[in-house]
Amino acid sequence: MNRKVILILADGMRPDSMAHLPYVQELMKKSAYSMKAETTFPSVTLPCHFSLFLSVPAERHGISTNLYMPPVRPINGLLEQLAAAGKRSTVYYDWEQLRDLWRPGSVELASYLKGDYEVNDEKHTVAALSYIEEKSPDFVFLYLGNPDCAGHDHGWMSGEYMKSVEGVWNQIERVIESCSDEYTIIVTADHGGHERRHGENIPEDMLIPLMLLGPDFAPGEIEHANIMDIAPTIAKLMGANCAHEWEGKPLI
C-alpha cells in the first residue's frame, strides 16, 4: 500500500464523552471503529504516546511517568520507520514532552506552540491544513490537548470537559471534511480519566476511542484494538516496515 495518513489524537478524550455527538454518529457509519480500544498501563500521557509510536508496552519502553527516560534498548518508532521508507512526516503539538517521540531527522516539520490548549488546537489545525494543501506530506500527526487540560481543571465528564471534547471535534471535522479524499484518517486518544485524574487500571482511564476512515477499512465495529496496533496499521497503510520489536498488530 502507499496511502497518506493523518493521525489525530485528542489527549484524555473518553469514548463516552464523544459518542453522542451528531458528527461522531455519522462518522461511525463510515469508519472502522472501537469505543473500547485499550491503552497501555500506566494510563499516563507520555507512556501512552510512547506505546502508540513504539508499539510496545510501558514495561518495554521503560517510561512510566511524564518524565522522558531514554530506553536502555532503543526501538525505532513509527516516525523513524516512515523516514527509512522515504516518507515525509509532520507533527503538530503543544505539550512539550512529546518532543522525544521522534529522533532528529525523522520529521520534515515539527510545530510546537506554548500556551492555551484550546487556542493552540485551532491554530495547529489551521496550520496543518495549510501545510497539507501546500506540501501534501505523507504523514501528519495532529495532537489536540484541550480535553486533558479541562479534565484536570474541572473533572472528566464535567460540563467544561464535555465542551472541550465538542471543541476538538470541531477541529477534527474540519480536517476530515478537507482531507478525507486524499488521506486515510485515524482518530484516537491516549487515555481517558475520572474525577480530575487518570493513570489507574480502570475502564474510565484505560478505554480509548479509535476510528479509522479510508478505503482500506470496512465500516463497522472492531472487536479488539489496542493503542499499540496503531503504528503497525499506519506502517502497513504507507508501505513502511514495522520494527521487529513492535508488539502491536495491523488492523487491516
Image (spheres, rainbow, N blue to C red):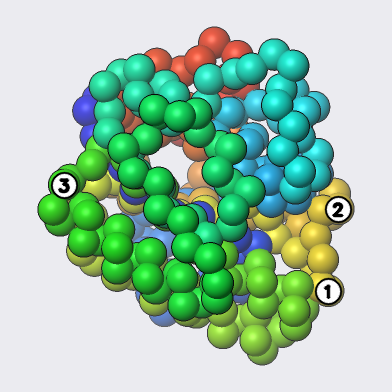
Q: Amino acid at mark 1?
A: Glu
Which is more N-terminal, label 1 or label 2?
Answer: 1
Q: CA distance from mark 3 to mark 1?
A: 42 Å
In this view, the residue farthest toward the bottom is 159
Residue at the image position 71 percent from the left and 74 percent from the top: 151
Find residue 145 and report its horizontal and vertical position in percent: 56, 65
> In the drawing, what numbered circle is on residue 135?
3
Find residue 224 and report its horizontal and vertical position in percent: 60, 39
* Mark 3 residue element: helix
**Which quadrant of the view contains residue 234?**
top left
Q: Are marks 3 and 2 in contact (CB under 8 Å)?
A: no
Residue 139 appearing in the image: yes
Residue at the image position 22 percent from the left and 28 percent from the top: 2
Which is more N-terminal, label 2 or label 3?
Answer: 3
Left or right: residue 202 versus residue 209 is right
Q: CA distance from mark 2 to mark 1?
A: 12 Å
Which is more N-terminal, label 1 or label 3?
Answer: 3
Question: Which residue was labeled with disc 2?
Answer: 200
Up-down relation of residue 189 to residue 21 (above or below): above
Residue at the image position 24 percent from the left and 66 percent from the top: 177
Q: Amino acid at mark 2?
A: Glu
Question: Which residue was labeled with disc 1?
Answer: 195
Up-down relation of residue 246 to residue 23 (above or below): above
